[in-house]
Amino acid sequence: MLKITDLHVDIGNLKIIQGISMEVRGGEMVSLMGANGAGKTTLMRAISGLGHITGGRVTFLDQDITHATSEQIVEAGLIQIPEGRQLFPLMTVRENLEIGAHTKRARARMKENLDYVYTLFPELKEMNAQAAGNLSGGQQQMVAIGRGIMADPKLLILDEPSIGLSPIMTQKVLQAVIDIHIRGVSVLIAEQNIRDVLKIAHRAYVLEQGVIRISGSAREMLTNSEIKRMYLGL
Amino acid sequence: MNIQALQSLLDGILMGGVYALAALGLSLIFGVLKITNFAHGAMMTVGMYVVYALASGMGISPYLALPAAMVLMFLMGFLIQRFPIHYIEKAPAHNQLLLTLGVAYILENTLLLVFTPNYQTLTVSGFDKALRVGGLTFAPAKLIAFCVVIVVTGCVYFLLYRTHTGNSIRASAQNDTGARLMGINVRNIRAAAFGIGAVCTGIAGGLLTPIMSIYPTLGESFQLKCFVIAVLGGMGNLWGALISGLIIGVIESLSGYYLGGSWSDMLIYGVFILILFVRPTGLFGKVNRREN
Ligand SMILES: Nc1ncnc2c1ncn2[C@@H]1O[C@H](COP(=O)(O)OP(=O)(O)O)[C@@H](O)[C@H]1O
Ligand SMILES: [Mg+2]
């Protein structure tokens, strides 16, 4: 579904991503692991058309999107729920959700997707008229996920969706991700709670200083001694 | 308050409405692009001349020329953003100032070339007769201008707050990354916002054409006025710009009545400086809130 070959991404004149190859197959949930500053966000932004790609190739559903614009990528069904949520703080919850359905494809399925968002997070219905900027972190993350759903993803990229959230809220967010995945959306997720995410993911990649250090099935990862030592604190 | 004072209050409100519309455009452009458009006054003059040329050239009413002027102003604003301004969006503020000032000079000098520096006056038949109600005089051009301002402002609000395009404009202003990741073409949205700002100021200009004699550099004084109004209202705050526009119109008119016309600018800028001392973000500006 998503195939990345020898990708290089710069920020300014710093080479941040230095030759990454990876893929997400249809129906998969893939975890992208790595310490802070490893390059997860830079990679994910580049996939979504917000990075300076200096080499390599990205294809999505057999279409070359290496140098596509973010609009074209979203239209193709590759949606990202970014780090830090990036909501529209002065707009209401409802408006934030509606903006999610920006593309023609998403607008056609707006009602269905909105119903699904409210099923997933019934509490959003009561917050409809509130400005997104006034919500708590957990509530904002629900809006961010809701907005992503509204964009009608085929592949959903989530960049640290539970960062800064309470354990209860974190579980809620991960449950939502599982639910979205079960509905047939492929998922690429960067998540701090390695243990939890490895239990639900099929495969994982470990990013270190802009290159893939380790990759394999999630089950292998859970028993890999290096992963255990570095990420699971065992 | 005697009847003359009431009359000048009324005139102030009517003219204030026109200022408010122009300043609304400036504030909108700032809100979306974070750029202070120093070509705003010149764009207003372009609006004046477009209406003048259409009305005098084709012999139609200046108000019938407004829709065509709107389309032209939108295209002009869209293109000005899309080409020169787009390339300095991330540049330091002084570069943005220089570039928009450069655009202003290009517009003004084009007008000079085409229309000469002479004053031009558009006479509209029937406008010599003023409407009188209980001692108050309503100049038809000012009255119509105010009504058009209300309609255009209403349309701009509807566009910004009730349509998907408007939501996209506001979303792009509030979070660029978020907007891009939802598939919004932020480049075009910014250009459209600039185009709408140009329409606001161009229409304000066009409405002044039947009211005053026009010349190519007339917009310069309005540039400063728009800036004062937009800052008073809180840059980017559209309601603030509207209310401040009315306030400035009234101050201008009342000070002219009580103190004489030469005082009005001094009073406007004096009040402006005083208010900024007390509230640096303007009357209706939010206290500096960090945006990410
Ligand atoms: N705007 C930037 N300017 C310079 N360096 C940056 C910028 N953003 C990120 N980096 C650097 O790129 C590297 C990868 O960052 P990032 O992709 O955010 O990592 P992660 O998401 O894995 O924490 C880090 O070393 C970081 O310091
Ligand atoms: Mg990150």
Image (cartoon, helix red, strand yellow):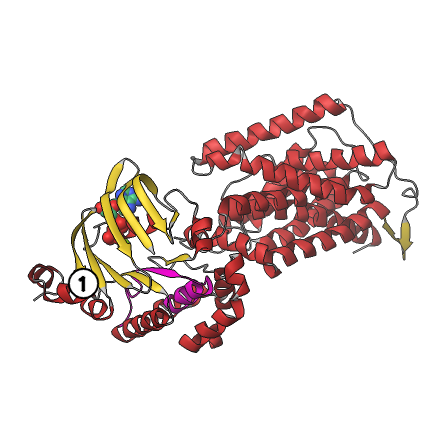
Q: Is residue B12 visible?
A: yes
Q: Look at the picture and state if A116 lies above or below B219.
A: below
| Residue at x 54%, y 64% (from the top left corner) | A108
Task: Please name whichever residue, A179 or A91, is drawn nearer the observer in this view of the structure.
Answer: A179
Residue A234 lies in the magenta stretch: no
Query: Which residue is under mark 1?
Result: A217
- Which amino acid lies under the numbered mark 1 shown in the image of this protein? Ser
| Residue at x 29%, y 49% (from the top left corner) | A4
Q: Quadrant of the N terminus of chain B?
A: bottom right
- Left or right, B60 with respect to B84, comes to right
- Magenta stretch: give its range: A141-166
Label 1: how many Cα within 10 Å (few below 14, some 14–19, many 20+):
some
Q: Find residue A34 and report its horizontal and vertical position in percent.
A: 19, 55
Q: What is the number of callouts on the image? A: 1
| Residue at x 80%, y 35% (from the top left corner) | B54
Q: Look at the picture and state if A139 lies above or below B175.
A: below
- Left or right, B229 with respect to A135, comes to right
Task: Please name whichever residue, B251 or A38, is drawn nearer the observer in this view of the structure.
Answer: A38
Task: Please name whichever residue, B3 or A193, is drawn nearer the observer in this view of the structure.
Answer: A193
Instruction: Identify the residue at the far front of this view.
Output: A62
Q: Mark 1, chain letter?
A: A
Q: Find residue A193 and report its horizontal and vertical position in percent.
A: 21, 66
| Residue at x 55%, y 33% (from the top left corner) | B100
Q: Is residue B274 visible?
A: no
Q: Secondary structure at mark 1?
A: strand
Q: Find residue B179 and report its horizontal and vertical position in percent.
A: 46, 53
